[in-house]
Image: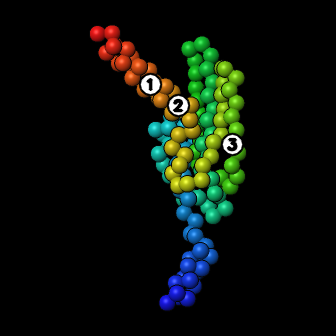
């Protein structure tokens, strides 16, 4: 019985897993809400990629979001004030929900500020 279980364990560990990476996809979208389509990646594509381009000056601004599958992970980013570009990638299914990690941090800061306001008002009354 032990030999059978050991053989089964070796077979499971050596078996090649089926490639089923899924990524959100969109081309030249102006919002993440336009990127809710998904696709199954090819066997050589191991990453979900989000590319963000944004620019603004005065009252005029625009952004472009592209999402899909990729065989390489080109993480990079640049922000020069009036324009920004970033490429982020991840390697689990449907992980490229949002490429805006700084927005997630801002939500935390906003929540802490609201909590501090409540504490201040409660102590002042």
Circle 1/circle 2 CB separation < 8 Å: no
Q: Which mark is residue 88?
A: none
What is the spatial separation of the Cα atoms under label 1 and label 2, in whole angstroms? 11 Å
> Marks 1 and 2: which is nearer the front?
1
Circle nearer the viewer, 2 or 3: 2
Residue 56 seen from this side = yes
- The residue lying toward the viewer, choosing from 99 and 25, is 99
Q: Position of residue 47 (x, y in %)?
A: 62, 53
Q: Residue 75 has which mark?
A: 3
Disc number for residue 105: 2
Q: Is residue 110 left or right of residue 101?
A: left
**Residue 61 against residue 6 in the figure, above or below:** above
Instruction: Say the numbered circle drawn on residue 112.
Output: 1
**Is disc 1 placed on a helix, strand or loop?**
helix
Q: Give the crowd class for mark 2: few <14, some 14-19, many >=20 residues within 10 Å.
A: few
- In front: 116, or 82? 116
- Tell me how far mark 3 sits from mark 1, CA to CA: 29 Å
Q: Is residue 123 above or below residue 70?
A: above
Query: Residue pushed farthest left?
Result: 125
**Secondary structure category for the residue under label 2:** helix
Give whichever of discs 1 and 2 has the lower sequence position.
2
The answer to whether residue 39 is visible is no
Which residue is rendered at x = 60% and y = 79% of the image? 10
């Amino acid at each position: 019985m032990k030999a059978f279980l050991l053989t089964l364990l070796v077979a499971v560990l050596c078996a090649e897993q089926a490639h089923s990476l899924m990524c959100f996809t969109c081309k030249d979208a102006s919002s993440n809400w336009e990127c809710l389509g998904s696709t199954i990646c090819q066997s050589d594509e191991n990453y979900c990629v989000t590319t963000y381009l944004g620019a603004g000056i005065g009252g005029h601004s625009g952004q472009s979001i592209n999402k899909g599958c990729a065989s390489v992970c080109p993480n990079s980013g640049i922000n020069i004030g009036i324009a920004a570009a970033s490429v982020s990638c991840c390697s689990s299914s449907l992980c490229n929900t949002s490429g805006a990690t700084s927005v997630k941090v801002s939500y935390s800061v906003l929540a802490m500020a609201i909590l501090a306001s409540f504490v201040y008002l409660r102590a002042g009354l």
